[in-house]
Every structure is written in C-alpha cells, then in structure tokens.
Amino acid sequence: MISSALQIALAHHRAWIDKDLDLAMSYLADDVVCEAPAGRIEGVEAYRAFLAPFAERLLIRAEMIAAFGDETTAVIMYDTETVPVASAPAAECVTVRDGRIVHNRFLFDRAPFEAAARRRQ
C-alpha cells in the first residue's frame, strides 16, 4: 500500500512531468515552502514561477529511480532528460499536511548544466 504522502508526491511529480502545471500546483499548499539550490521559494505562485521554465521548456522526460514515504513525508529520486543535458538527477523530500505539500527540500545536480554551458561557450 502506498502512503498518502507518497501518493501526493507522485501525483504532483507526474503532473509537472506531463507539463500540467495547473494540476501540479493543486497538490501544493498556498503557503508552500521550497528549499532549492537557487534558494528559498515561498508560496504557490513563486513555486510555479520556479518550476514552469524547467517543466515547460527544458524537460524532455523523467525516469523514476526510487520513491518512499509514510503518512507525512515522501522522498522521490528521479533522473531527467532535458534539452541541454541527457541526465540531470534530482530528489525531492516533501512534507504533506491536510492532503497538500507544505514543504519541499528539492535537490538537483547542477554540474551537468554547468558543463553544458561551458561547452556552448
């Protein structure tokens, strides 16, 4: 049986991978906080602004590596293929309260993107 937090994390992930940002945002609390390599992102609109360029313009596909969770916390790890790089691994640890993601600790490897940028120069 899949835990409720994991169900929500996976549904959110599937939605933005499918480029359905309206659906993806419906899994977030209005006051969601995301801790990302770019810094702290607060609120659903700021989260959308952070995610939209990647999901809508750069993402080609994603492959789930692992997913675990309990009733309040879920961790997913996946690898994305993007326009600039063939492999960009990422992980998210989300906290779910009242059926919505309230916190996301979002990690990804910047090195492939930095190497691609150096090659383009």
Image: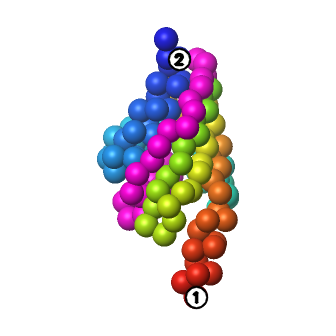
2 or 1: mark nearer the eye: 1
Residue shown at 40%/39% (left/top)? 14
Disc marking residue 38: none
Tell me if 8 is positioned left or right of 67 in this view.
left
Q: How is the image coloured?
A: rainbow
The first of marks 2 and 1 along the sequence is: 2
Q: Which residue is mark 1?
A: 121
Relative horizontal placement of residue 63, taking residue 37 as reference (left or right): left
Task: Say what amino acid the circle numbered 2 marks.
Answer: Ser
Residue at 52 percent across and 25 percent down: it is 6
Label 1: element kind: loop
Q: Give yes or no for residue 68 being in the magenta stretch.
A: yes
The amino acid at mark 1 is Gln
Residue closest to the eye, 39 or 15: 15
From the viewer's perspective, tell me whether residue 90 is left or right of residue 4: right
Tags 2 and 1 in contact by the CB under 8 Å rule?
A: no
Residue 115 position in % (x across, y down): 63, 73
Range drawn in magenta: 44-72
State how far apart marks 2 and 1 are (Cα). 46 Å
Tell me residue 62's x, y (percent): 45, 47
69 within the magenta span = yes
Label 2: how many Cα within 10 Å (few below 14, some 14–19, many 20+): some
Residue 70 falls in image quadrant: top right
For label 2, the residue is: 3
Residue at 53% of width from left, 48% of height from top? 79
**Residue 72: percent from left, percent from top:** 60, 22
Pick the quarter of the image with the C terminus: bottom right
